[in-house]
Amino acid sequence: MAKYIGITGGIGSGKSAVGDYLLSLGYPVIDTDVISREVVQPGSDTLALLTNTFGQDILLADGSLNRPEMARRVFTDVQKRKQLNAIMHPSIHRLVKERMAEVAHRPLVFLMVPLLYETGFQRFCNEVWLVQTSRQKQVERLTARDQIDEAFALKKIEAQMSDADRLAYGPKPIDNNGTLAALYRQVDELLAAEKPYDKS
Ligand SMILES: CC(C)(COP(=O)(O)OP(=O)(O)OC[C@H]1O[C@@H](n2cnc3c(N)ncnc32)[C@H](O)[C@@H]1O)[C@@H](O)C(=O)NCCC(=O)NCCS
Ligand SMILES: Nc1ncnc2c1ncn2[C@@H]1O[C@H](COP(=O)(O)OP(=O)(O)OP(=O)(O)O)[C@@H](O)[C@H]1O
C-alpha cells in the first residue's frame, strides 16, 4: 500500500522543481498540471465543454486550447475561473485517481497539486509538503518564467489560497527562497524521514 505525499504551494513557488528532483531520484510523481493538459486534448469531452461555455475563440488554429488566452480570461475574472474549475476539476480528479491506482504498489508516491487544499485533495494524501517562497521571489520567478508583467503575476498569485491558510492545515514546510541546491537538500532531509519507505 503506497504512502501518498502531496506537494503543494503557490504558483511559481517551486513545486515543479521539487517534482523534477523526485523524478530524477526515481520516485513516481503524479502532476495535476500535466494531467490538466491531457484532459483538454483536441476531441476530448472536456475541451468540448470548455468551448460550449467560453466559445470557439479559446481554440488555436490547430484545434488545441489557447492556454495564454484562457489564462488571461480566468485569472482576471473569478466567475470565469469558477466555471473553468467546475468543468475541469472532475476530469482531472478522475485521471489522478486512475494514476494513483497504477502506482499503488510503490511505497512512496508524490502528488503535485497546486490547488490541493482548495479542492480538498488533502484527504487523499497521507501527508503534505508545502513549498514556500516570499511574494517578491514568487513575482520575480513568475514574470521571468511566464513572460508576464508584475500586475498579471499578482492576479495569478491572488487566485490561490495564501500560505498562511495552507499552513493552518499542518503541512511540512519547504523553504524555496534560496538556491536549487538548498531546495534539494531539504527534500533529501524529508526523504530521510521516510526511511521505512524506498522507491522500488
Ligand atoms: C488556465 C490554464 C488553461 C492556463 O494554462 P497555463 O499553461 O498558462 O498554466 P498551467 O496549466 O501550467 O498552470 C500553471 C499554474 O497556474 C495555477 N493555476 C492553474 N489553474 C488554476 C486555477 N484554476 N486557479 C488558480 N490557480 C491555477 C497553478 O499554480 C498552476 O501550477 C490552465 O492553468 C488550466 O487549465 N487551469 C484549470 C485546471 C486547474 O485547476 N489546474 C490546476 C491543477 S488542479
Ligand atoms: N531555488 C530556485 N532558484 C532559482 N530559480 C528557481 C528556484 N526554484 C524555482 N525556480 C524557478 O522559478 C520558476 C518557478 O518554479 P516552478 O516552475 O518549479 O514553480 P511551480 O510551483 O511548479 O509553478 P506552477 O504553480 O506555475 O506550476 C521556474 O522557472 C523555476 O526554474
Image: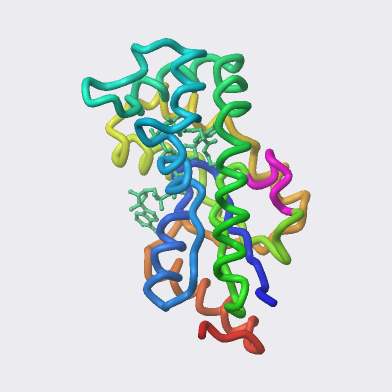
Q: Residue furthest bottom?
A: 196
Horizontally, is 67 left or right of 54 in the view? Answer: left
Q: Is residue 139 shown above or below 179?
A: above
Residue drawn at 32 percent across, 25 percent down: 66
Range of residues picked out in magenta: 116-122
Whether residue 27 sits left or right of residue 172 in the image: it is left
Q: Position of residue 142 (x, y in %)?
A: 38, 39
Q: Position of residue 135 (x, y in %)?
A: 50, 40
Picture layout, residue 143 above or below residue 179? above
Asked whether 119 falls inside the magenta stretch, the response is yes
Residue 161 point in image, percent of width and height: 65, 36
Q: Position of residue 37 (x, y in %)?
A: 41, 40
- In the figure, residue 102 lies in which quadrant? bottom right
- 7 and 44: which one is in front? 44
Q: Residue sitting at 63 percent across and 88 percent down?
A: 195
Q: Is residue 90 magenta?
A: no
> Tag count in the figure?
0
